[in-house]
């Protein structure tokens, strides 16, 4: 005998573009997103007994996303994700949870002849802003915001020494190394009881603060390790955004290896003479942590 132990369904990769035309200023602003919406609830019979009466078609979910995008601001993405997830659980009595993920892509306004252009934009990197919202019937709306794919590198100002050594250790200590990572940073908001609870929150301000803190700490910290530098980032984001309960980072350590070229006419390219390095794609270190406010230790 078998049983359905969990089920979710919906539409993924719903691509959205919205333009805001400011007729007075003669400028336009654009937002592009990719939305995923997955529903949970009393839908078991659609899997087990071919009962489609409980199915809010994935096409209906897609149309709903377009309509809600027309009727509401889609920026900040946190609020739009909450609007969609809340709509799903409040419209369909048999749907008890809605998981909405929004990826917001970068369209940065062009500067032409030193002035911001009124309607032209460019993709200044693969960095994305991500939001995951879950609305649960009778519980509230949970929101997690993320920065992903922000690639950073510093050419000095990073060390790694004093680590545990034993018969398996080959890595030399270093007081000056290249540090590079692709930032994945997340921050979990306190649970919102209803949509109106979101009104007092500056989601764009928090995203900017998290991004600025990440970059400034990365650049200015005399890094002892990825672990210590990322902890400092978490602490500052918690201090800057009171409505955030937890901050997490997942940082790959993208290694750059020295190349010994002394075999060729005694070329000096190691230690303080190193200028040409070999960037490594794999394997890479991967360091992750979650930091919360002081109190009883949360279960991980
Ligand atoms: O910042 C670092 N943390 C580590 O845990 C580690 N391990 C390693 O080989 N290099 C590094 N660098």
Image (cartoon, rainbow, N blue to C red):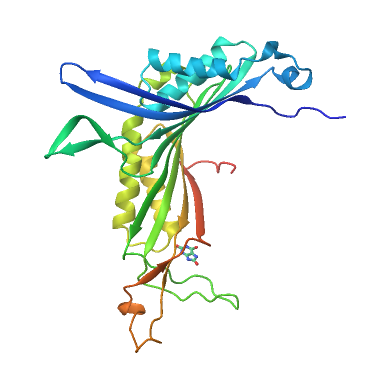
Q: Position of residue 59 (x, y in %)?
A: 56, 18
Q: Quadrant of the C terminus?
A: top right
Q: How many marks?
A: 0
Query: Vertical placement of 68 versus 258: above or below?
Result: above
Which residue is nearer to you in this view: 109 or 196? 109
Instruction: Name the residue located 46 percent from the left edge and 24 percent from the top edge.
Output: 81
**Which residue is drawn at the image coordinates 11% and 39% (left, top)?**
113
State the residue at coordinates (42%, 57%): 228
- Furthest toward the bottom, the residue is 265
Residue 31, image quadrant: top left
Q: What is the quadrant of the N terminus in the image?
A: top right
Left/right of residue 119 with respect to residue 76 in the rendered view: left
The x and y percentages for residue 255 are: 44, 64
Residue at figure coordinates x 65%, y 13% from the top left: 94
Residue 279 lies, in percent from the top left, at: 42, 65
Is 111 in front, or is 214?
111
Picture coordinates of residue 12, whole percent (x, y): 54, 28
Q: Residue furthest right?
A: 1
69 and 175: which one is in front? 69
């Amino acid at each position: 005998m078998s049983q359905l132990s969990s089920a979710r369904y919906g539409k993924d990769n719903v691509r959205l573009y919205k333009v805001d035309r400011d007729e007075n200023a003669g400028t336009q602003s654009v937002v592009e997103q990719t939305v995923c919406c997955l529903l949970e609830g009393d839908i078991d019979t659609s899997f087990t007994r071919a009962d489609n009466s409980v199915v809010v078609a994935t096409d209906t979910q897609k149309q709903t996303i377009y309509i809600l995008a027309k009727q509401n601001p889609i920026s900040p993405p946190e609020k739009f994700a909450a609007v969609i997830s809340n709509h799903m659980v409040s419209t369909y009595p048999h749907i008890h949870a809605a998981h909405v993920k929004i990826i917001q892509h970068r369209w940065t306004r062009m500067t032409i002849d030193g002035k911001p252009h009124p309607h032209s934009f460019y993709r200044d990197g693969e960095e994305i802003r991500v939001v995951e919202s879950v609305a649960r019937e009778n519980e509230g709306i949970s929101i997690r915001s993320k920065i992903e794919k922000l690639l950073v590198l510093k050419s000095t100002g990073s060390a790694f020494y004093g680590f545990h050594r034993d018969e398996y250790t080959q890595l030399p200590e270093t007081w000056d190394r290249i540090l590079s990572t692709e930032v994945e940073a997340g921050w979990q908001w306190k649970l919102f009881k209803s949509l109106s609870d979101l009104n007092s929150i500056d989601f764009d301000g928090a995203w900017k603060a998290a991004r600025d803190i990440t970059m400034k700490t990365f650049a200015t910290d005399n890094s002892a390790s990825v672990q210590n530098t990322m902890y400092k980032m978490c602490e500052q984001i918690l201090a800057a955004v009171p409505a955030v309960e937890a901050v997490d980072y997942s940082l790959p350590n993208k290694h750059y290896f020295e190349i010994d070229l002394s075999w060729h006419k005694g070329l000096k390219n190691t230690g303080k003479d190193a200028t040409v390095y070999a960037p490594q794609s794999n394997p890479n270190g991967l360091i992750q942590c979650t930091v919360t406010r002081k109190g009883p230790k949360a279960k991980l």
